[in-house]
Amino acid sequence: MKRHAVIVAIAASLLAAGTLAHAEAPPAGTIAGAQGEFIRNFDGAGAKLLQLAEAIPADKYAWRPAEGVRSVSEVILHAAGSNYMFMNFVGTAIPSGIDLKTFESSTSKKEEVVDRLKKSIAHVKTAAAAMSGADLDAQAKWFMGESSKREILFVLASHNHEHLGQLIAYARMNGITPPWSKKE
């Protein structure tokens, strides 16, 4: 009987792990505690990044303010790729087929860039919602040394806010008003 329970538990764990990449991201207001706080903060930046990515015309995706500075598509893909990288630091595998070394310059086609951003945001929200309080308290190594996984998540949210600000500046330099800033 115990062996049967162990097999069922292992099967359930494998099934849950295998479906994480395909799961729907939870609504931002449905998770309590630190995970909910992170998801709401991250979702605020992510939703605006998506709105702005969709508002910027496709012919502006190769635009950059100066030589040697990221283009519109590169900023969006940088944010998306970083979403995967930060989640990898806290223990969530990067989905197969994603190469972070080339991700930022992998495409400048608007529909592909927007789709990659959407998928990275869903990946973060789904993985964060699956974390427990103990997971958040656990220490993890990353490029800043060692920190709690909770701190790494909040740096991720800050990172998205940083590049949202960059993308707002890019949009305004091209005469595009962020959709949430337009007067009714």
Image: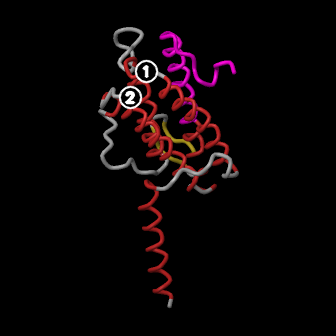
Compared across the picture, whether 64 is left or right of 136 comes to left
Main structural element of the magenta stretch: helix, strand or loop?
helix
Image coordinates of residue 122 in percent, x first then y, are: 50, 45
Which residue appears at 56% of the width and 21% of the height?
A: 165
Name which of mark 1 and mark 2 comes first in the sequence.
1
Q: Is residue 10 left or right of residue 43?
A: left
Q: Is residue 72 magenta?
A: no
Classify 10 Å Cα crowding around label 1: few (below 14), some (14-19), many (20 and above): few
Counting from the top left corner in percent of width and height, residue 3 is at 46, 86
Q: Give the amino acid type for the residue marked by disc 1 in the picture.
A: Pro
For numbered disc 2, what is the local secondary structure? helix
Residue 163 is a magenta residue: yes
Give the residue type that dot 2 points to.
Answer: Lys
Q: Residue at the location (56% across, 49% down)?
A: 128
Identity of the residue drawn at 39% across and 8% down: 66
For residue 151, the mark is none
Q: Looking at the picture, tell me which residue is in the foreground, 51 or 121.
A: 51
Which range of residues does the magenta coloring cover?
155-184
Q: Residue furthest front?
A: 184
Q: What residue sits 59% from the left and 38% below the top?
A: 43
Q: Secondary structure at mark 1?
A: loop
Residue found farthest to the bottom? 1
Which residue has dot 1 on it?
57
Q: Cα distance, mark 1 to mark 2?
A: 8 Å
Considering only vertical position in the picture, is 116 above or below 72? below
Residue 44 as seen in the image, left or right of residue 13: right
Numbered label tally: 2
Q: Position of residue 134 (x, y in %)?
A: 61, 56
Q: Is residue 47 left or right of residue 92?
A: right
Labels 1 & 2 near each other (Cβ < 8 A): yes
Image quadrant in which the C terminus is located: top right
Residue that badge 2 annotates: 110
